[in-house]
Amino acid sequence: MKIRLIPTGNFMLDGGAMFGVVPKSIWQKKYPADENNMCNLSMTLMLVEEDDRKILIDTGIGRKQDEKFFGYYFLNGDETLESSLARYGMDKENITDVILTHLHFDHCGGAAEYDSEKKIFHTTFPNAVYWCSNGQWEWAMKPNPREKASYLAENIMPIKESGQLRFFDNNFNFSKNIKIRLYNGHTNALAVPYINYGNRTVVFVADLLPTSAHVPLAWVCGYDTRPLLSFEEKNSFLNEAVENNYILFFEHDLYTPCCTLQHTDKGVRIKDTGNHPDELL
């Protein structure tokens, strides 16, 4: 079994939105912002090679949207989905499964793409089964006004129309080494994969914890639809992560991709950091 990290480029979001009620004078010491208060965030996916399966977790923002859309998010970085897969001798046809943590555009935008003439959308991974939680799919089909702009039909509908989409519910045993659990603070039924790897558990935390700077309990993302529930879920998860010595992988953290946690007199805090889960085994 192998874990590969698949960088797909970076994008920028407002720091105030990323850190909610935490003042900039505090959060900017943990995660930098530019002169426009924008934080640069990675969109790094995870590829799990398990037996004959190649399981991709999330798909990044993709390249379908127009220049105006991308102009809001200041895309940057040289790495793409294709170049990162090629580094391991793979391409999009090799992917057997795609786990979508949720259907916000920066997580599922790469799930579908234009055809060569840019007229028709089709799935990016023609040989893959796409997996999404029932609760998140239903939520995206009737989005609330707060999240509506994050759910784009061109990202979502080609997956359903292709016949490649499968659904799951809570505590889903995806494979012999991957279990998925659902959280509801950031969005409804956010899927978080727990991966048994080298006698440890690696957790792809997705937007449960967007970056390592979000580890302190009160640092809840302003994008979360149910911030008080996020607080409760996060408190439970952080304590569980310490007790079980989990390795956390942060999809959006440009500077600290992985860490372990420890109890301190200030609450749960980062213990060790690394660029890949292998460094923390």
Image (cartoon, rainbow, N blue to C red):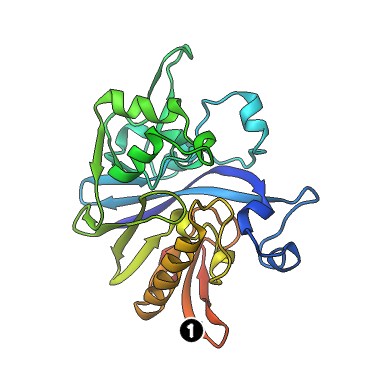
Picture residue at 38% right of the left edge, 33% below the top: 141
**Residue 163 place in picture, x, y as percent:** 24, 27
Query: Could you tell whether 237 is left or right of 199 in the image?
Result: right
Establish if 198 lies above or below 186: below
**Quarter placement of the C terminus:** bottom left
For mark 1, give the secondary structure. strand
Task: Tell which of 140 and 262 is nearer to you.
Answer: 140
Instruction: Tell me which amino acid carries mark 1.
Output: His
Residue 269 sits above or below residue 139 on the image? below
Q: Percent position (x, y) of residue 236?
A: 40, 72
Q: Is residue 8 visible?
A: yes
Of the 4 image quadrants, the one containing the N terminus is bottom left
Which residue lies most toward the bottom here?
Answer: 265
Q: Residue at x 47, y 53 (%)?
A: 186
* Residue at mark 1: 263
Q: Residue furthest right?
A: 35
Q: Is residue 61 visible?
A: no
Which is more toward the observer, 149 or 79? 149
Q: Quadrant of residue 27?
A: bottom right
In this image, 121 relative to 70: left or right? left
How many marks do you count on the picture? Answer: 1
Q: Residues within 10 Å of mark 1 (few under 14, many from 20)?
A: some
Query: Quick check: 169 left or right of 24?
Result: left
Q: How far across and down, in percent of the image, does residue 28 sit?
A: 72, 63
Rendered residue at 35%/50% (across/down): 189
Residue 5 location (% of width, % of height): 44, 52
